[in-house]
Amino acid sequence: MRYQEAFTGSKAEFGDFLKKAVPELFAGRLTVEGKAVSIPSDVELDYKVKYDEDAEGGSVSIKVSWENPNLELEIEEEEE
């Protein structure tokens, strides 16, 4: 499931948001749409920073992702 919250504000308000959200994330207290965000400590994390800029505007994204090590994939073989 995907959860998302959107905000609008000034650069200073965005800075205040980050100063609050990052410590909450690492303390296990960050929630998105009421869902607690939990970054696992026992798996490899993939993270990146993305910056886009053009004549219409720009964006900066910070993303972290990980695989579920308990996920079992079933591969069905076709019978001949």
Image (spheres, rainbow, N blue to C red):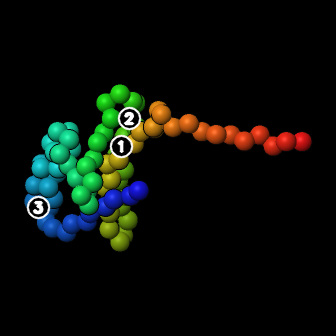
Secondary structure, mark 3, is: helix
Q: Position of residue 4 (x, y in %)?
A: 31, 61
Compared to residue 62, the image places residue 57 above or below, namely below
Q: Position of residue 21 (x, y in %)?
A: 17, 50
Residue mark closest to the camera, 3 vs 2:
2
Spatial CA distance of label 3 from label 1 is 23 Å
Query: How busy is the neighbourhood of tag 3: few (under 14 within 10 Å), some, or many (20 plus)?
Result: few
- Which picture quadrant has residue 52? bottom left
Spatial CA distance of label 3 from label 2 is 29 Å
Query: How busy is the neighbourhood of tag 2: few (under 14 within 10 Å), some, or many (20 plus)?
Result: few
Spatial CA distance of label 1 from label 2 is 7 Å
Residue lying at 81% horizontally and 43% vertically, measured from the top left: 78
Q: Which quadrant holds the C terminus?
A: top right
- Which picture quadrant has residue 12? bottom left
Q: In this orientation, does residue 22 appear?
A: no
Secondary structure, mark 2, is: loop
**Residue highlighted by disc 2:** 45
**Residue highlighted by disc 3:** 13
Q: Which mark is residue 74?
A: none
Amino acid bearing label 2: Leu
Amino acid bearing label 3: Glu
Compared to residue 74, the image places residue 51 above or below, namely below
Query: How busy is the neighbourhood of tag 1: few (under 14 within 10 Å), some, or many (20 plus)?
Result: few
Residue lying at 21% horizontally and 66% vertically, measured from the top left: 7
Residue lying at 31% horizontally and 55% vertically, measured from the top left: 60
**Residue highlighted by disc 1:** 64
Amino acid bearing label 1: Val
The mark tally for this picture is 3
